[in-house]
Image (tube, grey):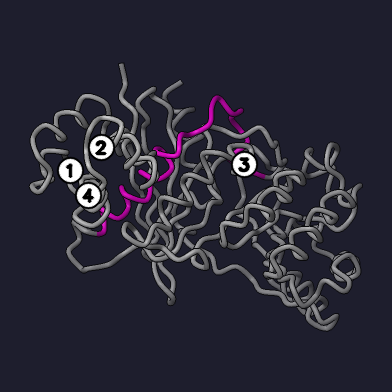
């Protein structure tokens, strides 16, 4: 039987678990530091933890539940990992290099049921959620990769934007956030973490109420229901008015900026008049909203979509800017490898089927 990932326990839960088995809280601190500061490869590598506790951990948990299946390295320093889970499923994780630090994009589900018509991640339906440990271990795998390089580099930022809808795996997402933010572990600051959702309105409100302090991004991609429904089937269940009401709730509760993600599709949603409609939709939310324009990475299976021209991207950007909307264009990473999210996984699965 496969063992549970030790990385799935928050510091509090680890202390509780060991305490229930007769170990002091200080022992949990030693184990936690062994995992996240010393980054041991085996429980036996925790030299300050007694043999009894090591055996207990070995009997119940695993340090490694992900194994590297494939790795692609880009000329710009981006590294895309394809990991195999204990049940044989494949997931993607991406390391990206920025001027501000090293960012890792993690996956939260095996497959995706949101069904955005332009996205490689949704080519394969969701088969299950990832555990908090499987999500956290993606960060650890990348950090260990950096450790082996010997340059003293550290993962500094996390984006939860990989395969799957994070808010459809809400409880495990929250545990993951608690684990990576812990100041005695990886100590990744909440302002260095961004969670992206396709727009699950009820979960956006819950996220605002529980407020883990991280950044929120919402995949919008169109300013009206007709267009958004055409490219994102979730809009049938959660139309724009309902989504914007949830965004308003989030803004009021947290008073933090939110990012609206907008992927530009040639002759679909990239015209200047659509930019003006988007500015009108944002309205008086302008001080707390940033629009992130995303150049499209073509996917063979979605041949109906093409990348917007540079002229169209510039015109769309300028139209928003002139309307007083905060707007940016996402810096591209890994364009010489399988850049689209889910693309590497999809190719590997097709190659072996």
Q: CA distance from mark 1 to mark 3?
A: 30 Å
- Magenta highlight on residue 214: no
Q: CA distance from mark 2 to mark 3?
A: 25 Å
Tags 3 and 4 touching, CB below 8 Å: no
Q: Which mark is residue 26?
A: 4
Q: Residues within 10 Å of mark 4 (few under 14, many from 20)?
A: few
**Local secondary structure at mark 1:** loop
Element marked by disc 3: loop
Mark 1 near mark 4, Cβ–Cβ under 8 Å?
A: no
Say which label, 4 or 2, has the lower sequence index: 4
Image mark for residue 41: 1
What's drawn in magenta, residue-wise?
Answer: 119-146
Task: Point out the tag, 1 or 2, that comes first from the N-terminus.
Answer: 1
4 vs 2, front mark: 4
Q: Looking at the image, do the residues carrying marks 1 and 3 touch, with CB atoms under 8 Å apart? A: no
Q: Are marks 2 and 3 in contact (CB under 8 Å)?
A: no
Looking at the image, do the residues carrying marks 1 and 2 touch, with CB atoms under 8 Å apart? Answer: yes
Decide: few, some or many residues near mark 3? Use Cα within 10 Å; few <14, some 14-19, many ≥20.
Answer: many
Rendering coords of residue 8 (x, y %): 39, 39
Q: Earlier in the sequence, mark 1 or mark 4?
A: 4
Marks counted in the figure total: 4
- The image quarter in which residue 318 lies: bottom right
Residue at mark 3: 165
In the rendered view, would you say 325 is above or below 193?
below
Residue at the disc numbered 2: 63
Q: Is residue 259 in view from this perspective?
A: yes
Mark nearer the viewer, 2 or 3? 2
Q: Extreme top residue here?
A: 1
């Amino acid at each position: 039987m496969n063992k549970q990932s030790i990385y799935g326990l928050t510091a509090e839960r680890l202390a509780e678990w060991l305490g229930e088995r007769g170990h002091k809280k200080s022992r949990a601190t030693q184990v936690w530091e062994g995992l996240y500061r010393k980054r041991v490869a085996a429980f036996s590598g925790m030299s300050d933890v007694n043999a009894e506790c090591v055996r207990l951990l070995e009997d119940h948990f695993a340090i490694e539940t992900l194994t590297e299946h494939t790795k692609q390295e880009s000329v710009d320093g981006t590294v895309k990992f394809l990991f195999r889970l204990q049940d044989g499923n494949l997931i993607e994780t991406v390391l990206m290099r920025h001027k501000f630090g090293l960012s890792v994009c993690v996956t939260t589900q095996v497959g995706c049921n949101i069904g955005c018509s332009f996205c490689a991640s949704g080519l394969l339906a969701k088969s299950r959620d990832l555990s908090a440990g499987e999500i956290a271990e993606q960060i650890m795998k990348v950090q260990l990769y950096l450790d082996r390089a010997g340059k003293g580099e550290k993962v500094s930022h996390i984006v939860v934007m990989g395969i799957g809808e994070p808010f459809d795996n809400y409880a495990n997402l929250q545990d993951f956030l608690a684990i990576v933010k812990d100041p005695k572990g990886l100590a990744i600051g909440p302002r260095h973490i961004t969670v992206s959702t396709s727009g699950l309105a009820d979960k956006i409100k819950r996220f605002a109420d529980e407020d883990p302090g991280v950044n929120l991004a919402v995949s919008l991609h169109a300013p009206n229901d007709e267009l958004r429904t055409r490219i994102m089937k979730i809009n049938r269940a959660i139309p724009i008015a309902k989504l914007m009401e949830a965004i308003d709730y989030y803004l009021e509760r947290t008073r933090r900026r939110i990012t609206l993600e907008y992927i530009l599709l040639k002759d679909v949603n990239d015209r200047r008049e659509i930019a003006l409609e988007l500015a009108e939709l944002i309205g008086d939310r302008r001080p707390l909203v940033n629009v992130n324009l995303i150049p499209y990475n073509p996917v063979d299976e979605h041949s109906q979509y093409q990348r917007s021209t540079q002229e169209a991207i510039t015109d769309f950007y300028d139209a928003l800017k002139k309307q007083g909307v905060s707007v940016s264009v996402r810096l591209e990473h890994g364009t010489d490898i399988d850049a689209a999210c889910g693309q590497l996984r999809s190719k590997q699965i097709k190659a072996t089927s």
